[in-house]
Amino acid sequence: MVEKRESFIIDIEDLDPSTKLFRIEAKDFTFKSGQFVILSLVDGKEIRRSYSMASSPYDSDYLEFCIRLKQDGEFTPRLFNLDIGDKISFEGPYGNFLLKEHEEKILIAGGTGIAPIRSMLRTLNEEKKLEKNIWLFFGFNKTGEFLFRKELEGYKKSGLNLVPVVLHPESHWKGELGYVMPAIKKFIPKGDEKDVYICGPPLMVRAVVQFLLEHGFSKERIYRDEW
């Protein structure tokens, strides 16, 4: 059921120089990992933008959003000027980018597209399902943009196959380089029957989908969320 609520910010965390994690109050709000809400601010007029939850349904009483500042945007400069205790409204949940029942999964994220993927991982971890042959390929531009690094690396202990991929690495980076497609081909050389969940910028998502189709993955088991 879609709800519209007035809420307030209860925490703000810097993730990198241009990205923050906003936590807002949301008691007894029901949603599924992968869904989004519409956040609303009033600054003379109402400004609305859609953001996926980065928290999971098991994170009671609050919602988290991983948001990157767009300097020339209408919404994020105002949002980034808010502080703990300031008001914000939300409406939702919306969306069908949802986990299916199949156990084996490939999760692919680009930049702040990690938000709904993180929500999914938290749900899978809570339900003791991370040991079921699950892969995460996470692409980002710079090493400092490895969002939620400590948390994601922690899931490796539960069985997650984590493959971070950086486009412009610093000299000490020892992981995969470039775009996520070559990394997927390296670790999963041919298509199989795993479900694939992709979230990120439209060009990235479309390129990954085309790559997967060309390498034998099933179109019916590829799920995407572009922003």
Image: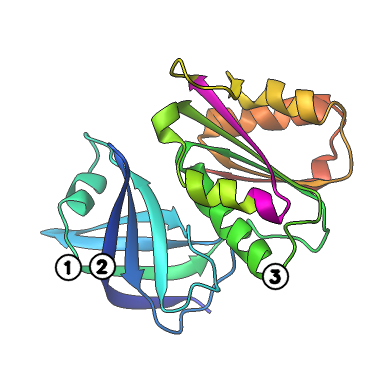
Q: Nearer the viewer, mark 1 or mark 3?
A: 3
Q: Earlier in the sequence, mark 2 or mark 3?
A: 2
Q: Quadrant of residue 58?
A: bottom right
Q: Does any portion of residue 220 appear in the rendered image?
A: yes
For numbered disc 2, what is the local secondary structure? strand
Residue identifier under label 2: 9
Residue at coordinates 59% horizontally, 62% vertically from top-left?
Answer: 122
Question: In the image, which disc is placed on residue 45?
Answer: none
Task: Compute the Cα span from label 1 to label 3.
Answer: 34 Å
Asked if the residues shown at circle 1 and circle 2 are in contact, with their CB atoms under 8 angstroms apart, the answer is yes
Q: Position of residue 117 (x, y in %)?
A: 58, 51
67 vs 74, nearest the viewer:
67
Question: In the image, which disc is placed on residue 127?
Answer: 3
Q: Earlier in the sequence, mark 1 or mark 3?
A: 1
Amino acid type, mark 3: Glu
For numbered disc 3, what is the local secondary structure? loop
